[in-house]
Image (spheres, rainbow, N blue to C red):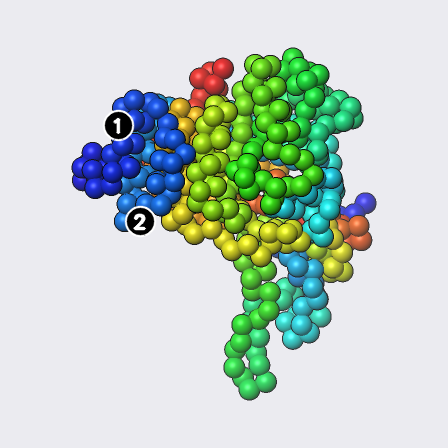
Amino acid sequence: MTTISRTTEYPILETARQQVLEGGIGLAEAQLLEVLRLPDPAVPAALELAHQVRLKHCGEDVEVEGIISIKTGGCPEDCHFCSQSGLFDSPVRGVWLDIPELVKAAKETAVTGATEFCIVAAVRGPDIKLMNQIKFAIDRINEEVDINIACSLGMLTRRQVDQLASWGVHRYNHNLETARSYFPQVVTTHSYEERLETCAMVKDAGMELCCGALIGMGESLEQRAELAAQLAALEPHEVPLNFLNPRPGTPLENQELMDGKDALRAIAAFRLAMPRTVLRYAGGRELTLGDLGTREGLLGGINAVIVGNYLTTLGRPAAADLNLLVDLNMPIKELQKTL
Amino acid sequence: MIPTRSTSSIIGSFCGHCGELYPKETFDGGSAPPSNVLQTGDGQVAAAPHQECAARLQLEPPRYCGQCGRRLKVQVSPHAWTATCSRHGTTAS
């Protein structure tokens, strides 16, 4: 059955086919809610359409990235999903990674074909010590590894944004995480507006903005649609899509895992909200979707993956994802195409 | 210098995921990893505690030392992890 015939069974998908696939215009919030409310039998058609949208507006390449924590744990913020907050009774201990280990990890990541290496720190925002470490790390990596460097260091000042841009940071990650209306349920130590300010400064400075979502935290479908629309309004270069992996000791430790079909609906909806954005599979997919779901997502709008481990948890072996891309005939995006 | 060991040599009486002491029946004094099944008094095989923890440890590194239950300093990189106990050294993936 073709995409066209399958979408006609569901009016919102037919609308999306015309508006997003043919017109290149992302769905609006109310339309996204309709996608998120599609019945289970409609999910394959939604994913197939999202895949067509991705192929038409992003191309067939898949962007591969590795991430690493330079400073783990001890964060003063209270993001309720995060095991690295120093405010919760989490088993994660504070630890710093030394620069040689960081360079080694960048080399190992580049070997997989990855074009992105993201250095992450669990902080509210970087202090001078961390900025100096980052500068040193960037210089060492650039000397030895051919890979784009991204950073995720929390909220930035204008001066810090400019410094990172001048040091050649290719992309900066700062997630919205959840919808504005749900944010106060998840974070109380800083505001949504503060996050938006950093995102805006990153774009102003000419860095690519990576701004992601974490779904399955107890938000409603309406709030999930709201989040997708709010991300689309930011026009980020990349959206990493995380699924909650409830962490011991955090306020969300007893949150039920998100239903796999809901996760797939969300993937389709986010692609239909942002037809040209890099939509990356990020944390939690192994638990929420398993191996089969990884395949379905890559055939349903996803066009980027984090390979290997995450910051404090383990991912699928990199080879499993890379082999899957071979099976699906999806080429890995080459470095020169990212510049 | 504290030695580095491979994961195959993780031996102990504490759960690496939750840090709790394993029930006595599930380990043999430290010479072998705890079993995932328990032999009950009437010969029935019952599910051992911490099976869920064992499953979780497929997707995350240990957070507690198997020998003493201390919290570990864990460093995760894209393709490996290390976990260091201040008393019992470093375990690596």
Residue B67 visible somewhere in the drawing: yes
Q: Which one is nearer the viewer's eye here, A220 or A115? A: A220
Q: Amino acid at mark 1?
A: Gln
In the drawing, what numbered circle is on residue A333? none
Labelled disc at residue A39 = 2
The foreground one among A182 and A216 is A182
Give the residue displayed 45% in from the left and 32% down from the top: A229
| Residue in the picture at 32% in, 39% down | A47
Q: Front-most of A252 and B12?
A: A252
Badge 1 is on which residue? Answer: A18
Q: Is residue A42 left or right of residue A67?
A: left
- Badge 1 density bin: few <14, some 14–19, many ≥20, Cα 10 Å: some
Label 2 to label 1: alpha-carbon separation: 21 Å
* Quarter of the rendering containing residue A23: top left
Tell me the residue at 73%/46% (across/down).
A87
Q: Mark 2: which amino acid? A: Pro
Image coords of residue A200 (percent x, y): 58, 21
Q: Is residue A257 left or right of residue A106?
A: left
